[in-house]
Amino acid sequence: MKTDPSNLIEVSLSLFRSKGYRRTSMADIGRATGLLKGSIYHHFPNKERLLIEVIQHVIGLFEDGVFTEARRPDLTEKQRLDGMIDAVESYYIQHRVCALVHLWPDALQESAEARELIQKFFRDWRDLVSDLLKPKYGQAEAHRLATDALARIEGAVIWLQIVGEEQALKQCSEEIRKLL
Amino acid sequence: MKTDPSNLIEVSLSLFRSKGYRRTSMADIGRATGLLKGSIYHHFPNKERLLIEVIQHVIGLFEDGVFTEARRPDLTEKQRLDGMIDAVESYYIQHRVCALVHLWPDALQESAEARELIQKFFRDWRDLVSDLLKPKYGQAEAHRLATDALARIEGAVIWLQIVGEEQALKQCSEEIRKLL
Amino acid sequence: MKTDPSNLIEVSLSLFRSKGYRRTSMADIGRATGLLKGSIYHHFPNKERLLIEVIQHVIGLFEDGVFTEARRPDLTEKQRLDGMIDAVESYYIQHRVCALVHLWPDALQESAEARELIQKFFRDWRDLVSDLLKPKYGQAEAHRLATDALARIEGAVIWLQIVGEEQALKQCSEEIRKLL
Amino acid sequence: MKTDPSNLIEVSLSLFRSKGYRRTSMADIGRATGLLKGSIYHHFPNKERLLIEVIQHVIGLFEDGVFTEARRPDLTEKQRLDGMIDAVESYYIQHRVCALVHLWPDALQESAEARELIQKFFRDWRDLVSDLLKPKYGQAEAHRLATDALARIEGAVIWLQIVGEEQALKQCSEEIRKLL
DNA sequence: GATGAATGAGCATTCATTCAT
DNA sequence: CATGAATGAATGCTCATTCAT
């Protein structure tokens, strides 16, 4: 049984994504990892810490899979934006939920640290997009367009989740690509 | 000590909006209404029913405050769309959360009836916007634009909620108004 | 809606017979009588009193339908015993439960008065049968045979209830008849 | 503070015997075992399971103490029947209640599994007695006599329980012995 | 009498957390 | 490190009873 913390985090992420943080019990996590719930406390001092590390893990996945794309120095801004949108689109089509939005209500109520991580993530992401748009649109307009793009993506993912239609996400990817 | 159910529903909505459905206990609702938790069952047979009626109440508020605006037969499509966006914008600036999106994860896990109400609400809203856009854009394009508009609004509200910036909502309102 | 106490008692008996005393709520009784649970307290000061009066009602039914048969001065002992057994047999074939045995565990725990009523009922019944047998068997043997007959009847009713076979009741009726 | 489940079952049986299943709360069981009510769920997933295992335990006691006697291949049928009746008599004189009959109303209402266990127990017991009587009486008559014997025993135990007289049980043991 | 709202104690069950082994 | 037993507080819900109208 793989009991290294990183496996625990991945399993927890998967459970949190489907059932939410609150509804996922330590026993659920134990069951899914082959550990007993008591043993989880050898790896994480409490459930809140687990939430935080799951959030950091998700942020890490975006750093690696999405943001990296947007930062490649060998590409033009256009290429970098397109690469980022490709990564985002396929990520959400696969998972159908934005884990961080999903976890937000719980983070808000139960963990200041988690809350700030999530907020920072979205701001960082927006700033990243803003940087791509700045050469073409200038500081202020780029900031506005980037904020809008991010909100649109999240809205499209919500729509995918609730209404079940992928169209909104594809449409918004399309239009964001057109920005450059 | 006459507790009319509609007061219970409003209090519950307010609690659900800030803490979520799962995290709001019957005792919380009792405390906020001056009742004991057991007494709530005099008005609602169980917590799920309360959730459903809260959702119906929210939908009713939209019917009255937002959809009505979009249906006024005395106005042009442009005026109706603008009226609807005005109503939506001020509603969300005030509440900073879309209660139905907020309740979605709990509804998904705990109540098929609640889930369907929420899904239907978003589809109905989208269809309403689509009807306004149809004369100008035709069936298919209107549907696409309406879906996109709705997802954008919800995304902007999420952004308002998490990042705390109203700008995304204002920006998206602006652009939806420009559709007509 | 008939709200006289005797209707309440009959409805309660029927509910107690099928669900037991403890599992029958005042609301159940209200629902079954067309009253609201609060109104029951106009007729009975509390649930225990209702239990007691239900027990007295059942005893009254036996007095009228079963014991009377056994006391008719115009008949021989043999005829009276047969008449009693006929009445008992058809009563239990119809109801499949001895209400007083069914209520015993609850009576034992919750009401000294109910407990004593039930105990007295069985002793009285036994003495009645004993009186019928005395001329033929003498005091001591009649007492023994009557006790045995009563226990057999109750055992056969239990068997009918749990195993669902009427045979035991018929068999024991037969043998009791053969005593005279 | 090692609480083995079998102790929990015995304590529960004892409580169920005196108060019944429904009236025995998990807190009662906890109190009687030195556990908190929540801790019982470490050993049994729910109260119904506890009921079922208590019933299986009682059946096991009969298997070991009563049925075994009736199955000894080294004895004649007469000896086996006498041994069984001895065991039954002393068991019920000691406990003064047939736990399975006592639990029947609750089992009937709350657990199909418990209900079937109890029904099967009585049928099995009857068949066992029937097998002892078959050589002497033939299949059909043995079945009838065995059913009658079982119902009599249960009736006598009810009588012992309610009226408090042991005589009925002794009388019926006597007569069952006389069958062989 | 009847009503229906409210009470308060109780119940089965869940769960994050602790800790001796 | 892992286990599994235990904790204690909380949760949704039930119910006999009271009482103002």
Image (cartoon, coloured by chain):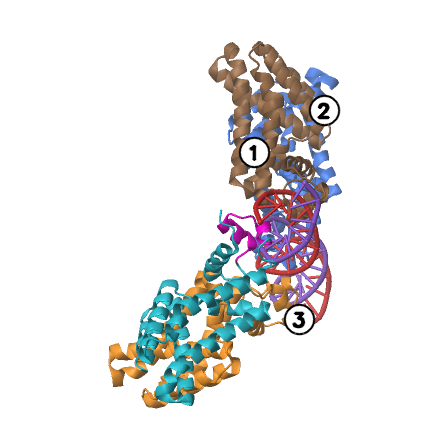
Chain colours: A blue, B brown, C cyan, D orange, E red, F purple
| Label drawn at residue D34 | 3
Q: Position of residue B108 (x, y in %)?
A: 55, 40
- Mark 2 surroundings within 10 Å by alpha-carbon count, few (fewer than 14), some (14 through 19), many (20 or more): some
Please say if D154 is above or below F12. Answer: below
Label 3, secondary structure: give it: loop
Q: Which mark is residue A92?
A: 1
Q: Is residue D38 magenta?
A: no
In the depicted view, which residue is nearer to us: A132 or A28?
A: A28
Q: Please state the chain letter of the residue tagged with numbered disc 1 in the rendered image.
A: A
CB-based contact (under 8 Å), mark 1 and mark 3: no
**Label 3 lies in what chain?**
D
The part of the chain drawn in magenta is C24-41
Please tell me whether residue B103 is drawn above or below residue B85 in the rendered image. Answer: below
Residue C38 falls within the magenta-colored stretch = yes
Residue B166 got which mark? 2
Q: Main secondary structure of the magenta part?
A: helix
Q: Is residue B77 left or right of residue D135?
A: right
Give the amino acid type for the residue marked by disc 1 in the picture: Tyr
Residue at image position (62%, 27%) is: B61
Q: What separation in Å lies between label 1 and label 3 (alpha carbons)?
A: 52 Å
Between the C-alphas of marks 1 and 2, the distance is: 25 Å
Residue sitting nearer the eye, D126 or D169: D169
Q: Quadrant of residue D66?
A: bottom left
Residue at image location 58% in from the left, 53% down from the top: A28
Instruction: Give the quadrant of the N terminus of chain B.
Output: top right
Report the label total: 3
**Place of residue E14 in the rendered image (x, y in percent of width and height, measured from the top left):** 60, 54
Give how far apart the Cα atoms at labels 3 and 2 are.
Answer: 58 Å
The reply, left or right, for residue D111 in relation to residue A15 is: left
Local secondary structure at mark 1: helix
Mark 3 touching mark 2, by CB under 8 A?
Answer: no
Identify the amino acid type marked 3.
Gly
